[in-house]
């Protein structure tokens, strides 16, 4: 048992865990860390979350809500559902109930809002996702979540960092 697992076992306080995923290597490492912790943890529920929305460059067109917008939104939602389905498969042998959730919104605000409304005890998040240049060191999404989450946040380091 590693030190993190030992601390969690002593505390026994992480009953509801939120794991945001975006398909990046860092988010998959967060999933792996969650699975590792669940071997000895007594959580009652894990929620795998993905947040999707229009890329920043296209948000100006969101008001139009025409056919192109509808098609793009449908495609983004399909991709997000596929990601959730693939991620959920990794929890196939998990003894804890697992739920998936898709939110149409803006990162990182949607993660913090879900954590608040869902009354989670722990968020496990990758240190860097698919955010690009802004994600130096910790990453803008991870940093926002750490600073504003109403619960404990476990940030997993990307391999090689």
Image (cartoon, rainbow, N blue to C red):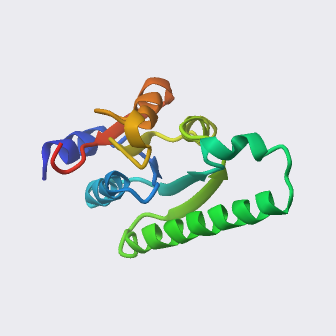
| Closer-to-camera residue (41/83) | 83
Can the viewer see residue 39?
Answer: yes
Query: Residue 82's spot in the image, x, y percent?
Result: 54, 71
Residue 105 visible = no
Q: Position of residue 15 (x, y in %)?
A: 44, 47
Number of marks drawn? 0
Residue at x-position 39% and y-position 47%: 129
Which residue extends farthest top? 147
Q: Is residue 44 above or below residue 145?
A: below
- Please indicate whether residue 79 sits to the left or right of residue 30 in the image: right
**8 w.r.t. 134: above or below:** below
Quadrant of residue 77 in the image?
A: bottom right
Looking at the image, residue 38 lies above or below residue 61: below
Residue lying at 86% horizontally and 57% vertically, measured from the top left: 66
Q: What x and y, as percent, mark residue 91?
A: 39, 69
Q: Quadrant of residue 59?
A: top right
- Which of 65 and 87 lies nearest the eye of the viewer? 65
Instruction: Identify the residue shown where x is 33% and y is 55%.
Output: 34
- Residue drawn 54% across the image and 62% down it: 99
Which quadrant is home to the C terminus? top left
Q: Position of residue 61 (x, y in %)?
A: 77, 45
Q: Is residue 151 left or right of residue 60?
A: left
């Amino acid at each position: 048992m590693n030190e993190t697992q030992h601390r969690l076992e002593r505390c026994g306080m992480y009953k509801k865990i939120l794991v945001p995923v975006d398909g990046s290597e860092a988010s998959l490492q967060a999933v792996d860390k969650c699975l590792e912790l669940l071997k000895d943890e007594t959580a009652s529920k894990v929620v795998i979350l993905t947040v999707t929305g229009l890329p920043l460059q296209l948000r100006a067109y969101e008001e139009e809500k025409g056919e192109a917008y509808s098609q793009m939104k449908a495609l983004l939602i399909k991709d997000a559902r596929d990601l959730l389905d693939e991620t959920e498969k990794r929890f196939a042998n998990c003894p804890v109930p697992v739920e998936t959730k898709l939110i149409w919104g803006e990162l990182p605000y949607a993660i913090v809002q879900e954590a608040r409304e869902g009354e989670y005890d722990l968020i496990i998040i990758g240190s860097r996702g698919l955010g690009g240049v802004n994600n130096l060191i910790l990453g803008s999404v991870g940093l926002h979540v750490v600073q504003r989450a109403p619960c404990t946040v476990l940030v997993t380091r990307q391999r090689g960092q």
